[in-house]
Amino acid sequence: MERRKILVVDFGGQYVRLIARRIRELGVFSEIISPEAGLDYFSQEEVAGIVLSGGPASLKMAGAPLIDSRIFSLGKPILGICYGMQLMAELLPGGHLKASSRSEYGRADLLIKEPVGVFQGITVSGGGKSPGKKVAKKSFPVWMSHGDSVEEVPEGFQVLAETKELLVAAMADSARNLYGLQFHPEVEHTCYGREILGNFVHQICGVTGSWNIKEIVSEKINQIRTKLGSRAGVVLGLSGGVDSAVTAALLHRAVGERLQCIFIDHGLLRMGEVQQVVETFSREFKLPLITVDARERFLKKLAGVRDPEVKREIIGETFVRVFEEEAGKLKDITHLAQGTIYSDVIESGEHSNAEIIKSHHNVGGLPEKMELDIVEPLRDLFKDEVRELGEELGLPAEIIYRQPFPGPGLAIRIIGEVTPERLEILRQADAIFRKELEKSRVSQQIWQAFAVLPDIRSVGVEGDSRTYGYPIILRAVSSSDAMTADWVKIPGEELDRISRKIVNRVKEINRVVYDITSKPPATIEWE
């Protein structure tokens, strides 16, 4: 099914998925593509507009990612954000960039000089000498993250906004519908960001907000049927989380009994999780479920391994090999389905321009040679969209709103080597922490909560004796899409109760600490 869409060109910025998400929140489909995409792709009739994303590179350095300059002559509205605006100035006649000796990162106050185009209707304060004339007299906060800046705008452009540090914070060639913003309208820190993007998408590109979750369900089912054809069978690696559960529901609607779900117990799960997953799945889906006990195999592969990226690679490859072996016992299985979502892809560095934050076992951890083709129907959806999809498919709340749990499991919550002894210590502490949080006043704020076991020991005292035990790190964050997150302010008396229960019940632990770092600069997980 064809639809009008906005293309978001990925120049490696960590906010690129957030741009796409914000556009979707406006009810318009967005697609992220590489700048190497051919001019014919940008020229498609259904492309209503193009956004050039930010990125970590500098156009003053060799090898900076570029785009075919003919894109600006296609007649499509284009919005350049940060690096994308600088690229406009670099590629269009008359534009000039200025290299900065220092980067500007964080809040800045934006003053709109011309309330037109993307700033239409966004005037903080009216007034002026002429009655009825709109003049933005006061500034409002926006989020900056850049090094270079535009010194001279290209021919035909005018300056729309400035800050104390930047004479050109926004620019436009309204006749050609070309706009540039040095700040990031997609982040929550920018005031009027939604309105600015809405002006571009709805007013300038002329796209109505008609894309919705019902359309996504229909489209995904059609995509699965097209990929698998009429005979191919598919195995799904079920983890019990919302991503794999929604993938299972979609696949079941699309191909019915040709779906075979496999649950692998890799020995890296939380306390009681194996029984919980098997019971919930059999009750809700009523499909045959193969349970594979591969605990010994995974732990043997991980023995002596300390590097987190190597852990992910080992787990990813071992997962695939187990699936291939199980699929070989079945008839007509040609595909392996995974619950990969957008945040997995971006953090694993999908495009050549993107920085790798950490490889996800189902993206960067996959082996190069595989016997099964991959099916990933959720690959272009954010976590909140996946949950909406689950609601539309009728999944129960206990599955939809289950806290995210990484595929590599506790292996990436143990810093250093994974051993049976350390797994048991972490399981016990993690179970106490999560159970106590269910009683907490802040339980509704929590997106994800877990414990981390570091590879150090610390001195303590118990009675009259010296102890030399493990510290345990507790982490609880609030988020909506896992792209950004903030730490949850658990009341001190509740942290005190949790700490005392952990050190009293888990004898190997003699110290409890709480992680109060947001994402960014940290990630949610420790490895």
Image: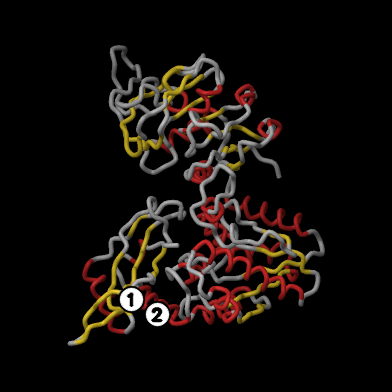
Apparent side of residue 224 relative to residue 426 in the rendered image (left or right): right
Q: Secondary structure at mark 1?
A: strand
Quadrant housing residue 448: bottom left
Assign the C terminus to one quadrant of the image.
Answer: bottom left
- The residue at 71%/69% (across/down) is 259
Determine whether label 1 and label 2 are within 8 Å by CB.
Answer: yes
Question: Residue 62 versus residue 284: which sits nearer the camera?
Answer: 62
Among all residues in the image, which is located at the extreme left? 464
Q: Amino acid at mark 1?
A: Tyr
Kindly identify which numbered label has been placed on residue 470.
Answer: 1
The mark nearer the N terminus, 1 or 2, is: 2
- Looking at the image, can residue 26 be seen? no
**Image x and y of residue 139, in percent:** 30, 29
Q: Height in image: 287 above or below 378?
A: below
- Looking at the image, can residue 21 be seen? yes
Among all residues in the image, which is located at the extreme bottom? 464
Quadrant housing residue 187: top left
Distance between the alpha carbons at the discs numbered 1 and 2: 9 Å
Question: Residue 434 versus residue 305: which sits nearer the camera?
Answer: 305
Q: Height in image: 133 above or below 417?
A: above
**Image x and y of residue 198, in percent:** 48, 35
Assign the N terminus to one quadrant of the image.
Answer: top right
- The residue at 58%/42% (across/down) is 30
Question: Residue 34 versus residue 177: which sits nearer the camera?
Answer: 34
- Residue to which mark 2 is pinned: 425
**Image x and y of residue 345, in percent:** 56, 53
Q: Secondary structure at mark 2?
A: helix
